[in-house]
Image: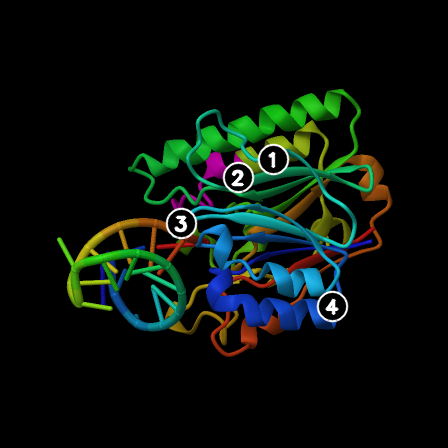
Amino acid sequence: MKIASWNVNSIKARHEHVLRWIDSIKPDILFIQELKGIEENFPKSDFGDRGYHLAINAQKTYNGVAIASKYPINVLSDSILDGDDQARFLEVEIENIRMMNCYMPNGNPVDSEKYPYKINWSNSLIKKINLLYKKDISFLIGGDFNIIPTINDVHDPIKWEGDALFRPESRALYRTMHNIGLYDAYRIKHPYETDCYTFWDYQGGAWPQNKGIRIDHFLLTPDLADQLKSCDIDREPRGWDKASDHTPIIIEL
DNA sequence: ATGCCTAACCCCGTTAGA
């Protein structure tokens, strides 16, 4: 089973890229983040024509997540924080595997209300992870975590010091998920590699110079980690004309 | 030095992203 995750930075602006990519890679399941528009902006019939079921959690202008799946989707939840007005979460069950698609908050600037929101949101997810893990439920989390896990995941650690994506407190959140017992699918298959990123800023020639960060992840419970055949970042779509600033990550179970 | 991109929405300049 091939499962992918991609922050598309507007489904309206990127739907041709997304369709071109799924026609080439043919993922069984795709987690999408940053729809940046209402459900009507989602090209539902194009996905339907290709045999995908859909679960969509969208809002106007901001955020928004969706799951496209060749298998039927049982939606369990669309919120991780009580009273959250931002569409950032989808929890589903597909083929007896619990799956969570997350667009975690960015948190910048760190002296604004956005930073505590990031921390609260993440802690709420951690509580959920802990609960499911203790119940011995098999699950995976994929999406845009907006966390750079370690210095091996950023081209210039000094430059990113203090940024909400890389400050010690943010890295500690990621480490907590790991310490509970989840595994970073990319690092299972590529433990030593550096300069492997999922995001490159539009500014300053970041992409041609490979000045990126690794912030899009899949985390797996141990039983799923044992089933992991591959995990790769597909850099190709980042080089396309009018690209998203993120590129897809793919796992195979 | 938050800007040297990009997208949405519409106060077509401002806000947000990361």
**Amino acid at dot 2:** Arg
Q: Residue at x 84, y 54 (%)?
A: A229
Q: Mark number for residue A60?
A: 3
Q: Earlier in the sequence, mark 2 or mark 4?
A: 4
Residue at numbered disc 2 = A171
Q: Chain letter of disc 4?
A: A
In this view, A241 is above or below A184: below
Q: Chain letter of disc 1?
A: A
Q: Earlier in the sequence, mark 4 or mark 3?
A: 4
Q: Are marks 2 and 4 on the same chain?
A: yes
Mark 2, other Cα within 10 Å: few <14 / some 14–19 / many ≥20:
some
Residue A214 appears at what percent x and percent y?
57, 55
Q: Chain letter of disc 3?
A: A
> Which SS class for mark 3?
loop
**Amino acid at dot 1:** Arg
In this view, A171 is above or below A155: above
* 4 vs 1, front mark: 4
Q: Which residues are magenta?
A: A161-172
In this view, A79 is above or below A23: above
* 2 vs 4, front mark: 4
Mark 1, other Cα within 10 Å: few <14 / some 14–19 / many ≥20:
some
In this view, A111 is above or below A72: above
- Left or right of B4 in this view: A107: right
Q: B17 or B4, which lies in front?
A: B17
Q: Mark number for residue A25?
A: 4
- Given contact means CB atoms under 8 Å apart, are the residues at marks 1 and 3 in contact? no
- Given contact means CB atoms under 8 Å apart, are the residues at marks 1 and 2 in contact? yes
Q: A144 or A31, which lies in front?
A: A31
